[in-house]
Amino acid sequence: MNIYVPYVTNNGGPHSETAAFLKDKATFVNLTGDDGNYFRLVKMLWKKQEDFTIVEQDILPAQKDLDDFDSCPEVWCCNPYDYEGKNGKSIAIACLGCTRFRKGIIEQVPNLFEIIASYDSGTMSWNQFHWVHLDGLIWRTLFYKFGLRAHIHDKVIHFHKYLGRSIYV
Ligand SMILES: [Zn+2]
């Protein structure tokens, strides 16, 4: 399994427990410096047409979670995690935090990132290449345009508390 841990150094980099657990298992990718780097990374991984797993820098899966990704035949699998939302504690389901895509879903939607890039944000202040929108745009595109849903696995540990992030279910 190809596991990637995207991180930025301006908020401390990978959590020490995430780094320790994955140091021999994953490729750590420094995305510091440009809010579009996360989009470019996942687009590049998608283009490789190989199974891959994303574990974000503040997420800690258990070995069992990684084993479950390896053994599960579904093409898109995800571990939800707790986060601190506007109204207190919530659970993030539509996320990239701990997600495994198989070649099978990439083959179904090979142009996923071209579709996302084509969205017109009009006069809105957001843009579709910013990391904060990446998880939601992937989920929304795969679900609303292609009827695909992630297979939800066990909850994993989330160290960081996000404020005001939206969730998509
Ligand atoms: Zn699964």
Image (cartoon, rainbow, N blue to C red):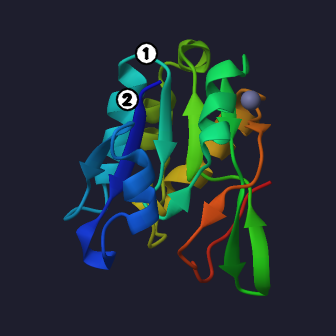
Give the total of numbered labels. 2
User: Which quadrant would residue 168 be assigned to in this image?
Assistant: bottom right
* SS for dot 1: loop
Contact between labelled residues 2 and 1, with CB atoms less than 8 Å apart: no
| Front residue of this view, candidates 74 and 134 | 74
User: What residue is shown with label 1?
Assistant: 49
Residue 14 versus residue 12 in the image, above or below:
above
Q: In this view, does 160 lie above or below 55?
A: below
What amino acid type is highlighted by mark number 1? Gln
Residue at 67% in and 45% down: 140
* Image x and y of residue 13, in percent: 31, 67
Give the residue drawn at x 68%, y 34%: 77
Mark 1 C-beta to ligand 1 under 8 Å: no
Q: How far apart are marks 1 and 2 (CA)?
A: 7 Å
- In the image, taking residue 104 as reference, residue 168 lies left or right, namely right
At mark 2, the secondary structure is: helix
Inspect this view and state whether residue 129 appears.
no
Compared to 17, does 89 lie above or below? below
Classify mark 2 as within 8 Å of ligand 1 or not, answering yes or no: no
Q: Which kind of residue does numbered mark 2 sit on?
A: Leu
Residue of label 2? 45
Q: Where is residue 44 in the image (x, y as percent from the top left)?
A: 32, 31
Q: Which of 65 and 4 is in front in this view?
A: 65
* Image coordinates for residue 89, horizontal then vertical, percent: 77, 80
Q: Quadrant of ligand 1?
A: top right
- Say which residue appears at 41% left-offset and 46% top-offset: 22
Name the one closer to the observer, 72 or 90: 72
Residue 20 visible, this angle:
yes
Q: Nearer the viewer, residue 150 or 116?
A: 150
